[in-house]
Image (tube, rainbow, N blue to C red):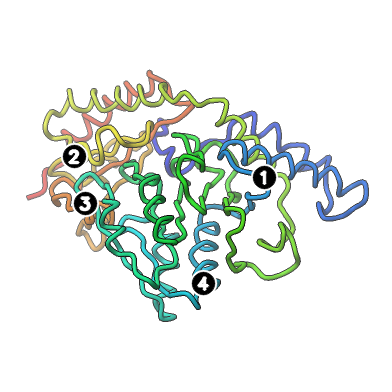
Amino acid sequence: MIYLDYNASTPMDPGVRAAMLPYLGEYFGNPTSSHGVGVPLRKAIDTARAQVASLLGVSADEVVFTSGGTESNNHVIKGVAFALADKGKHIITSSIEHPAIKNPCKFLEKLGYEISYVGVDSKGRVDPDEVASEIRPTTILISIMHANNEVGTIQDVPEISSIGREAGVLVHTDAAQSCGKIETRVDKLGVDFLTIAGHKFYGPQGVGALFIKKGVTLDPLHHGAGHQGGIRAGTEPVALIVGLGKAAELAEKDSDHSHVANLRDRLHAGLSEGLGDDVVLLGHRTDRLSNTLCVGFRGRIGGEVMAGCPDVLASTGAACHSGKAQRSATLAAMDIPEEVAFGAVRLSVGRFSTEAEIDEAIGKLVKAAKATPVIG
């Protein structure tokens, strides 16, 4: 199998696994306990919190551990909405956000909140000026993803954060796809909240973190005991948190992403050589994630192309229902023509990808695409 779906989930780094193992057996108990069993667990959590904080360039007390990106996003959207309801009930987001942003917003709409969904251009870019034009006196939050999970396009989050600060509006970015692939330092992004997910950068599944700027308040998502400063109730999963901390440490050390960028470009060049104009790059050519190549196989159905090379593992950008293809929400927002969007495939490489795998995948994908019937 050739794994080209690193944006869906990354394999756990061996160093992460090794760091976690003692906390799956040797160390046990409740990290809130003040006796000899609990204290080592609390120290391990503190170390992991410092590791994540270092990667993001923030203070350790600004990091809250969660169950993953979905929870972190829900906590920001709902927590700000409920905490600032007296100020206003208007939120700005984009039309290409992950469902973990869109669906909490839809939930709030049922409660009387107003959501503005700004569009994107054909490359998947949000225009900061359009964000600025949507701000009202009742706006309480702007949430724009750092990089799109499907096409990899990177947003101008620093400019959007500047707009938010000037208007007195809080800004959140979902950095689940960008953390570990490009720089995600908060001092450069300028956000008040930032989401990361462990399994997107070689950590374990089921754990993530949320940066909450010091001095900013939001309502808890989970109500219970006073864990994590009363922000997120629930006994911390120490092994998962240790794994996330180690993944953050490794990501900070491995800041040179030229390896994956070269593999991504090698893959694109090979497909273009084999298929010519029948392969179309989707997303921004330069301002995109170093590991992400989203292409449309013109005139084909992406799922059918991938069915022709079942040992190449990737994600398609079009869903097929009742025999009829449908563009993804992202490609529809980008106004990608159906003849290209239906053939969309996201190919994402990673730390453990090799040139040999890429070359083999090129051959298989080109052969499969040529053998796939062209839709009328």
Q: For the residues marked 1 and 2, what is the alpha-carbon distance in whole angstroms? A: 45 Å
In the rendered structure, which amino acid carries the disc numbered 2? Phe
| Residue that lies at the very extreme toward the top in this rendered image | 356
Residue 84's disc is 4
Q: For the residues marked 3 and 2, what is the alpha-carbon distance in whole angstroms? A: 17 Å
Looking at marks 3 and 4 on the same chain, the residue that comes earlier in the sequence is marked by 4
- Image height of 230 relative to 259, above or below: below
In the rendered structure, which amino acid carries the disc numbered 1? Ala
Q: For the residues marked 4 and 2, what is the alpha-carbon distance in whole angstroms? A: 46 Å
Residue 334's disc is 3
Residue drawn at (44%, 80%) of the image: 111
Q: Secondary structure at mark 3?
A: loop
Residue 135 location, quadrant: bottom left
Check disc 2 and report the residue beneath it. Answer: 297
In the rendered structure, which amino acid carries the disc numbered 4? Leu
Badge 1: residue crowd in 10 Å (few <14, some 14–19, many ≥20): some
Q: Nearer the viewer, mark 1 or mark 2?
A: 1
Q: For the residues marked 4 and 1, what is the alpha-carbon distance in whole angstroms? A: 25 Å
Q: Position of residue 261 (x, y in %)?
A: 37, 26
The quadrant of the rendering that contains the N terminus is top left
Check disc 1 and report the residue beneath it. Answer: 60
Q: Position of residue 36 (x, y in %)?
A: 92, 46
Q: Nearer the viewer, mark 3 or mark 4?
A: 4
Q: Nearer the viewer, mark 4 or mark 2?
A: 4
Residue 369's disc is none
Looking at marks 4 and 2 on the same chain, the residue that comes earlier in the sequence is marked by 4
Q: Secondary structure at mark 1?
A: helix
Q: Position of residue 91 (x, y in %)?
A: 39, 67
- Image height of 251 relative to 206, above or below: above
